[in-house]
Each structure stands twice: as structure tokens, then as C-alpha cells.
């Protein structure tokens, strides 16, 4: 449908605040948006698309803005740009399944202006801003690999984050390959993520990127490949040297797949960058029989043994004892692998 103009779509409260911000007495202050905006497909809210609500938040916004999304399936891509911090995206349903933002771009999908989207650009929802929160909704990428078997590069991201202090609470990230990209703006910039009480589904490198991320109280669901085969990788960290990568703690790894067919992770040296030092630690987590007995593997010529991969106090049929193929933290070492060690001065 045609996009409603920003002037016509602005709620009265937001319009008033923008006019006030334009006055000389307010010139020294950062813009402030209305505290709450509503998205509803049936037109009963302020906007009918999530992107329209994001667009209504002024650049340089300095205060929390909650975008409440009413139940429904929103087939669109969404970009939260870096100059719009403090956004809170909240589903209004009884569960995350009631509100779904979904699209079907892949890395190899042709762009209207030429070229392809690439992995990062395939994201259904892309968050480049700091201090973003999402609660009680689903981010999905339903790219059909079988229907596009003749297309190269099937990576298809549901949610990409690049900002710092990202809180994801009670969300679902659903896809196949490369579902959840937890990243930072560049390898010199910190991007901390706290993912809790959520569910992440996928089969190949479906939690990946260079963010410093704590994943806790979350169900990690490995799924079969679109052709029905059972094989894959949970994580592919691309951590910069001197930073922390992925800490998976107090989670459950499950899935209706064959036994011993999924790796916990492999090191992603993006672009062949040998200076990266990928890190993934899985601790205090229930592992199903899907996990391979040697749970880490190499990637693109880089050995996992040269990077940082370990476990601690995992349980379930997929857990194992310490061996050359399965390094375990000691009790003393584990004390330095807590969420606070990852998050530093940020308390979500």
C-alpha cells in the first residue's frame, strides 16, 4: 500500500514535540520522540508497518521510545539506523508467536538496483543503534532454499544487531542458515548483547558474528536442513582479539534431528582475517544427543584449536568429559566466565 507521509502519520503528541524541538529555546537539546507509538495492521494504531514507526522517531533521539506491535504477521524489512537509539520494540500478544516480522531475502537475492544483498543485508530486521530492546515477538526469515536451488548463497538472516547494549528478552529468532547475526559496527567497536528467555532456531552457523554476547535461559533449537538432512553448526563467532565472544549459559539445546550430527561451533575468521580470535563458551547447559562428541570444528582453513572454545558443567546426552577434542574450563577458570565478565559496566 502507499506509504503515508510522515506529516500525515505523526501522532499529535509526536508532532507537538517535534515543533517544540524546532524552537530556539530547545535548539541545544537532543530531539525527543513521543514515549509510545503503536503499530497495527488493521489501521487502529499510529502506523500499519513497523518501519513507519521507526521512521517517525527523530534522528538523535535521546529518550526511550516504545513501539508496541499489535498481533499479526508483518511482511517487511526493518532498519533501525544508528542515529535512533533507545528504541524498545514490544509485541502486544500473549506470546512471541503472536507478532511476527518476516521477510525472505537471502545473501544471493538480487537487489532492485543491481547486485545482491549479501549476508548482512539479507536481515529481516537490522538494528544498528545502541540501547535497543526487543521483547515478546518473532523475527523470521522464511527464504525458501528449495525453491531457489539455482541461486547461490542461501544465508538468510532473521535479526542482525550492530549496536551496543542490545537487550533481547522473550523473542524468537527463526530461520535456517545464519539466523541470528550478533555483530558490531566494526572490529574496533564493542557490541554487547544480552539474549534471555528466548528461542533461536536454525541449522548452519545460526548464531554468528563478532558481538560480545551473553545467551542465557534460552532454547537453542537445531533443525534439519531444507532437504531433510541432519548436519550443522550452532555458533560461528568472529570475535576481535582482546574481546569476549559468545557465552551460552543456562540454556537448553534441543531439536528433532539425528544424534551426533551438530557441532557447537566453528571459528569464523571473516574475510580471512587471521587477527581475529573467535570465542564461544557453552556452560551449565542441557545438551541433547544432537551434539557431536567432538563438538568443535575448523572453518575455512582456520583451526578451532587456535582460538577460544570451551565448555563447563554441561549436562544431558550431548555432554561429554574433557578430552583433546572437548576442552573444559576448570572451576577456577569458570569464575571468570560469568555474564558480568562479558557485560562490564552494563547491567541489562
Image: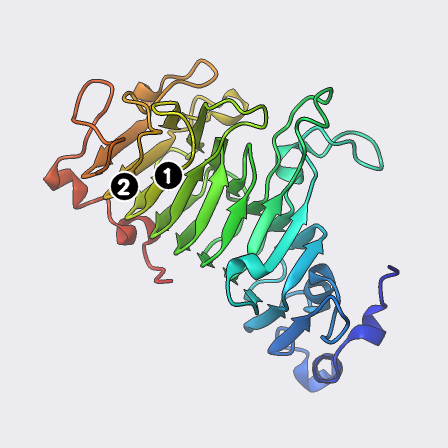
Q: Which residue is mark 2?
A: 286
Q: Nearer the viewer, residue 160 or 150?
A: 150
Which quarter of the figure has residue 278? top left
Percent position of residue 265, x then y: 38, 28
Q: Which residue is mark 1?
A: 254
User: In the rendered image, is residue 62 in sight?
Assistant: no
Q: Residue at x 74, y 70 (%)?
A: 47
Q: Residue at x 56, y 39 (%)?
A: 175
Look at the image and tell me in which quarter the C terminus lies. bottom left
Label 2 element class: strand
Give the answer, above or below, for where 264 lies relative to 174. Answer: above
Question: Could you tell me if the residues under marks 1 and 2 are in contact, i.e. CB atoms within 8 Å?
Answer: yes
Percent position of residue 269, x then y: 47, 25
Q: Residues within 10 Å of mark 1 (few under 14, many from 20)?
A: some
Give the answer, above or below, for where 191 lies relative to 98. Answer: above
Q: Residues within 10 Å of mark 2 (few under 14, many from 20)?
A: many
Left or right: 294 as drawn, with respect to 335? right
Amino acid at each position: 500500500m502507499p506509504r503515508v507521509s510522515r506529516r500525515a502519520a505523526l501522532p499529535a503528541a509526536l508532532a507537538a514535540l517535534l515543533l517544540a524541538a524546532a524552537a530556539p529555546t530547545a535548539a541545544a537539546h537532543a530531539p525527543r520522540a513521543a514515549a509510545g507509538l503503536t503499530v497495527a495492521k488493521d489501521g487502529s494504531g499510529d502506523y500499519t508497518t513497523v518501519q513507519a514507526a521507526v521512521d517517525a522517531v527523530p534522528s538523535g533521539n535521546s529518550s526511550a521510545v516504545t513501539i508496541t506491535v499489535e498481533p499479526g504477521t508483518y511482511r517487511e524489512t526493518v532498519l533501525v539506523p544508528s542515529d535512533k537509539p533507545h528504541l524498545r520494540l514490544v509485541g502486544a500478544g500473549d506470546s512471541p508467536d503472536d507478532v511476527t516480522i518476516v521477510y525472505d531475502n537471502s545473501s544471493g537475492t538480487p537487489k532492485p538496483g543491481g547486485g545482491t544483498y549479501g549476508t548482512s543485508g539479507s536481515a529481516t530486521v537490522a538494528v544498528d543503534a545502541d540501547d535497543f530492546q526487543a521483547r515478546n515477538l518473532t523475527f523470521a526469515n522464511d527464504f525458501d532454499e528449495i525453491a531457489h536451488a539455482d541461486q547461490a548463497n542461501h544465508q538468510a538472516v532473521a535479526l542482525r544487531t550492530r549496536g551496543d547494549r542490545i537487550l533481547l528478552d522473550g523473542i524468537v529468532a527463526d530461520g535456517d542458515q545464519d539466523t541470528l547475526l550478533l555483530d558490531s559496527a566494526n572490529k574496533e567497536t564493542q557490541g554487547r548483547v544480552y539474549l534471555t528467555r528466548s528461542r533461536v532456531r536454525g541449522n548452519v552457523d545460526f548464531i554468528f558474528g563478532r558481538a560480545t554476547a551473553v545467551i542465557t535461559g534460552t532454547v537453542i533449537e537445531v533443525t534439519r536442513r531444507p532437504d531433510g538432512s541432519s548436519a550443522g553448526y550452532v555458533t560461528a563467532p568472529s570475535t576481535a582479539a582482546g574481546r569476549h565472544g559468545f557465552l551460552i549459559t543456562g540454556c537448553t539445546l534441543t531439536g528433532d534431528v539425528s544424534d551426533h550430527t551438530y557441532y557447537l561451533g566453528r571459528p569464523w575468521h571473516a574475510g580471512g582475517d587471521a587477527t581475529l580470535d573467535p570465542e564461544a563458551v557453552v556452560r551449565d547447559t542441557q545438551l541433547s544427543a544432537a551434539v557431536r562428541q567432538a563438538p568443535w570444528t575448523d572453518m575455512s582453513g582456520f583451526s578451532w584449536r587456535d582460538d577460544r572454545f570451551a565448555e563447563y558443567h554441561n549436562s544431558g546426552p550431548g555432554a561429554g568429559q574433557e578430552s583433546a577434542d572437548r576442552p573444559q574450563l576448570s572451576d577456577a577458570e569458570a569464575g571468570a566466565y560469568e555474564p558480568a565478565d562479558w557485560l562490564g559496566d552494563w547491567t541489562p
